[in-house]
Amino acid sequence: MIVSAAQLHLCIGDLDGNRLAARRAIEAAAEAGARLIVLPELTASGYVFDDRAEAMSLAEGLAGPTVAEWSGLAAARDLVIVGGVAERDAGGSLFNTAVVVDSTGLRASYRKAHLWDREKEVFTPGDARPVLVDTAIGRIAVMVCYDLEFPEWMRFAALGGADIVCVPTNWPLAPRPEGERPGEVVRAQAAASTNRVYLIAADRCGAERGVSWTG
């Protein structure tokens, strides 16, 4: 099976442009034969918010245009798509959420439980373990970025019988010795190896408001 981790150059606040970038990546991956496509964390909105008010203005419900578009693409091409959105719920809470869609529509959503750095000033943490979804391509587990740093989360996924763990991420680029792999990549590889499960992490590329991404 062919899978795709889509490295996207996104722009904070450009909802239409970011959706277009995701759509083009999904279509290109599907043309190349991919059945599972993983998009970055907070694909539609961007990540480096000035404050919670800005994030709220860019958030949407799970019945919003981003999930609807991904569901349509999944149905048209028989895909499984995992991607990140800023989710605003009916009560006014804001979550860093990953969704799973396939040819039948929205299958599941997962709210990031372990918030990193200034995310705590913006989002409400999720209160559930990684979601597990049985799909036409196997059982997938979903978590978001910093969740991967916590061994228990990968262990929950593995013990739940996951065939593949999908991780939308926004990994800031950090200094490292020349020729060395990024620390996040090393830890992801170790987590996958320790738990004997495949892992797909999709990070961004480029930069946003002074933050460069590992890619």
Image (spheres, rainbow, N blue to C red):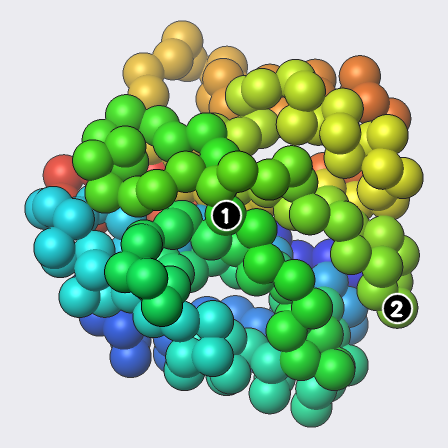
Q: Position of residue 122 (x, y in %)?
A: 23, 42
Describe the element under mark 2 as helix, strand or loop. loop
Q: Position of residue 57 (x, y in %)?
A: 17, 66
Q: Which mark is residue 111?
A: 1
Compared to residue 156, the image places residue 92 above or below, namely below
Describe the element under mark 1 as helix, strand or loop. strand
Compared to residue 112, the image places residue 173 above or below, namely above
The residue shown at (69%, 47%) is 131
Q: Residue furthest top?
A: 177
Q: Position of residue 98 (x, y in %)?
A: 53, 54
In this view, the residue in front, 112 or 175, is 112
In this view, the residue in front, 142 or 204, is 142
Q: Which amino acid does the dot numbered 1 rest on?
A: Arg
Q: Residue furthest front?
A: 91
In this view of the protein, can residue 144 be seen by the observer? yes
Q: Around disc 2, counting alpha carbons within 10 Å, would you say few (fewer than 14), some (14 to 19), or many (20 or more)?
A: few
Q: Which mark is residue 62?
A: none
Please indicate whether residue 17 sits to the left or right of residue 66 in the image.
left
The residue shown at (38%, 31%) is 115
Q: Around disc 1, counting alpha carbons within 10 Å, would you say few (fewer than 14), some (14 to 19), or many (20 or more)?
A: many
Q: Position of residue 194 (x, y in %)?
A: 80, 17
In this view of the protein, can residue 8 be seen by the observer? no
User: Which one is earlier in the sequence, the residue at label 1 or at label 2?
Assistant: 1
In this view, the residue in front, 86 or 73, is 86
- The CA distance from mark 1 to mark 2 is 23 Å
Q: Quadrant of residue 134?
A: bottom right
The residue shown at (82%, 22%) is 195
Quadrant location, the C terminus: top left
Quadrant location, the N terminus: bottom right
Q: Which amino acid does the dot numbered 2 rest on?
A: Ala
Q: Which residue is mark 2?
A: 136
